[in-house]
Image (cartoon, helix red, strand yellow):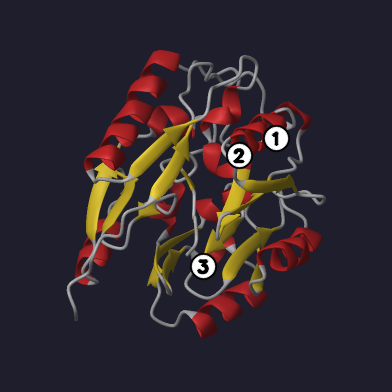
Amino acid sequence: MDKRQARPRHYLMCEPTFFEVSYSINPWMNPSCPTSTERGLAQWMTLHDLLVGLEHAVELIEPVAGLPDMVYSANGATVVDGRALVARFRHEERVKESPAYLDWFRARGWEARQAESINEGEGDFLCTGDVVLAGTGFRSEPKAHDEAAEYFGKPVLGLTLIDDRYYHLDTALAVLDDNEIMYHPEAFSPESRMLLEERFPDAILADAHDAAVFGLNAVSDGLHVILAQQAERLPCQLRERGFEPIGVDMTELLKGGGGAKCCTMELREGD
């Protein structure tokens, strides 16, 4: 096996200045369970500094008061070849995030528009080397897949999620390199599981424990894989494939239903 190489990435993050769990729109959110904005900020800062230390470019979008989930910046848009398709959120609590992301992109000269269908950004749209993997079942609509395919000019492979703990695709599947992924089979419908098995026969499969600690909500640069430090088997599985896993503690932000990947939107400029 050739030695893997890290490739410089460009990310957008949002500081969790206003992070709290004051409502519930996924099974991880329990408003009666205390949250610490200070602890969430410290965990987020560790992730931010790690990405910078790995020599990736990290930009910031200004957090907006009253939008505690804005820290999960991956949900704000999908960016491919310099074009941003900004999210149209399913839940009212997150709807006002979209204008903030649209303004951010346009102010910096990106080609950007808001999706017409319910589309929750990189939460449900993950780019591999030659296809966009797109989730549905709980958030993004199936017709959002067609819209993304037309906008980006790339084939989109639709996948159906069936376990509401894994309400976004990026909670059940991670892209490791061009055509390499890891995923939790039980999160997907039988038809989608078959599609994944056919297209990615050598994928890393995560067990129930590692999926439940959000081990698949991971960020990879082709060499380093940043994932929940609570994952037990995935780090060994990754090392066997030549990756370098790096554990981070995101347990406070997991109270809102997000981990390392949820907090990082990749900005793909294209050629």
Q: Residue, x 67% and y 70% (percent of image)?
A: 153
C-alpha gap between disc 2 and disc 1 = 11 Å
Tell me residue 157's x, y (percent): 64, 72
Callout 3 touching callout 2 (CB < 8 Å): no
- Please state which of residues 2 and 213 is positioned toward the viewer in this rendering: 2
Choose top left, top right, bottom left or bottom right for residue 21.
top right
Q: Earlier in the sequence, mark 3 or mark 1?
A: 1
Q: Amino acid at mark 3?
A: Pro
Query: Of 167 and 14, which appears nearest the observer?
Result: 14
Marks 2,1: beta carbons within 8 A: no
Establish if 264 lies above or below 9: above
- Nearer to the camera, 249 or 124: 124
Q: Badge 1: few (under 14), some or many (20 or more) residues near its Cα, within 10 Å?
A: many
Which residue is under mark 3? 185
48 lies left or right of 3:
right
Q: Is residue 192 left or right of residue 225?
A: right
The type of residue carrying mark 2 is Phe
> Who comes first in sequence, dot 2 or dot 1?
1
The residue drawn where x is 54% and y is 76% is: 196
Side of 132 where 23 appears, left or right: right
Q: CA distance from mark 3 to mark 1?
A: 31 Å
Find disc 2 in the rendering and name its residue: 105
On the image, the x and y values in percent for residue 177 come to 37, 67
Judging by the rendered image, the residue that carries numbered circle 1 is 98
**On screen, 187 above or below 154?**
above
In this image, 165 relative to 86: left or right?
Answer: left
Q: Which is in the foreground here, disc 3 or disc 2?
A: 2
Dot 2: element: helix
Residue 65 location in percent, x, y? Answer: 61, 14
Label 3 CA crowd tier, 10 Å (few <14, some 14–19, many 20+): many
